[in-house]
Amino acid sequence: MNTKSDIQLFSREFRASVNQRLDELIDNASSNDALTEAIRYSLLAPGKRLRPLISDAGPRLRH
């Protein structure tokens, strides 16, 4: 990963992967629709992927 486009591609793929998994987990979290929507709102809000993205990308940047 050494170009801006590589980083952008990694970021898009990472967010899509994390969002898909969170969506799967949220669907199974509760039978209460109001609670499920609150969980979904909290976890899938924009801007919540930067810290995990940096944590995952850090070791990859060393190569």
Image: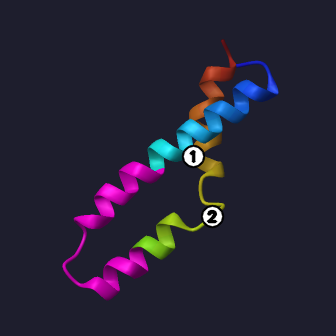
- Mark 2, residue position: 46
**Which residue has dot 1 on it?**
52
Identify which residue is drawn at 54% across, 39% down. Answer: 14
Classify 10 Å Cα crowding around label 2: few (below 14), some (14-19), many (20 and above): few
Of all residues, the one furthest to the bottom in this rendering is 34
| Residue 15 part of the magenta segment | no
Residue 35 to residue 49: above or below: below
Nearer to me, 6 or 63: 6
Q: Quadrant of the C terminus?
A: top right
Residue 15: percent from left, percent from top? 55, 46
Q: Nearer the viewer, mark 1 or mark 2?
A: 2
Q: Main secondary structure of the magenta part?
A: helix
Is tag 1's residue or tag 2's residue first in the polypeptide sequence? 2
**Dots 1, 2 in contact, CB < 8 A:** no
What is the x, y in percent for residue 29? Answer: 25, 69
What element does badge 1 sit on?
helix
The image's mark for residue 22 is: none
Up the image or down, 3 lies above or below 52; here it is above
**What kind of element bears circle 2?**
loop
Q: Which residues are magenta?
A: 19-39
Q: Residue at x 22, y 75 (%)?
A: 30
> How many angstroms separate mark 1 from mark 2 (CA)?
13 Å
Q: Quadrant of residue 22?
A: bottom left
> Is 28 part of what is drawn in magenta?
yes
Q: Amino acid at mark 1?
A: Pro
Query: Residue 5: where, in percent of width, then height?
Result: 76, 27
Taking the spot 22% from the left edge, 65% from the top edge, the residue there is 28
Amino acid type of the residue tagged 2 in the rendering: Pro
